[in-house]
Amino acid sequence: MTLVVRAVPWSDPNGEALRLAQQAEISSRYGVPDSEPGPKPSAADIAIFLVAFELASDGGETAVGCGGLRVIDDDHGEIKRMYVVPDRRGTGVSTAVLTALEGEARGRGWSRLVLETGDLLGGAMRFYEREGYSRIPNFGHYADSSLSVCYEKVLSTSEA
């Protein structure tokens, strides 16, 4: 599989389709149409949105994963809408997107990334822990959410 991860506008149709698929999957797991405890990300607060494309030998491409960064302050940001289509999980797409997001964060001078995931998303929790994220107390809008699990990673500038 040849994969490329690139920035797209928030309104990009591939990104929109992936975000809708993520929200549909989460809704089916939690049994409610919207379980997000905080404000939904938007073009106004997402610093960068990345989409992973699988490249075909004929030159075509298929969007298979995504993720974005929301600015928290000058030193850190939050990962939002990290998602990989089910049939590409375990193939390296999620690692490629996360690595690209971490690189973007370092490029902005951020020293730390945080994120929130759902308590029923064991695969996501295992992935973040494997990638060096540590569980932290729920923060911000997630502080009082019993459905939220929060993580952080201190970014080393030497990995840029």
Image (spheres, rainbow, N blue to C red):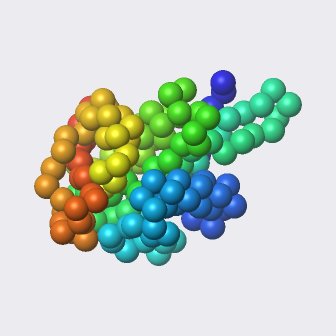
In this rendering, is residue 130 above or below 5?
above
In this rendering, is residue 43 above or below 22?
below
- Residue 25 drawn at (x, y percent): 53, 53
Work out whether residue 78 or residue 87 is closer to the camera in this orientation and state it.
87
Residue at image x 23%, y 66%?
Answer: 145
Residue at image x 61%, y 34%?
Answer: 87
In this rendering, is residue 33 above or below 135?
below
- Residue 16 drawn at (x, y percent): 62, 62
In this rendering, is residue 158 above or below 155?
above
- Residue 159 drawn at (x, y percent): 31, 32
Residue at image x 24%, y 52%?
Answer: 150
Q: In which quarter of the image is residue 127?
A: top left
Relative side of 91 to 53, left or right:
left
- Residue 15 drawn at (x, y percent): 61, 57
Q: Is residue 5 visible?
A: no
Residue at image x 47%, y 75%?
Answer: 44
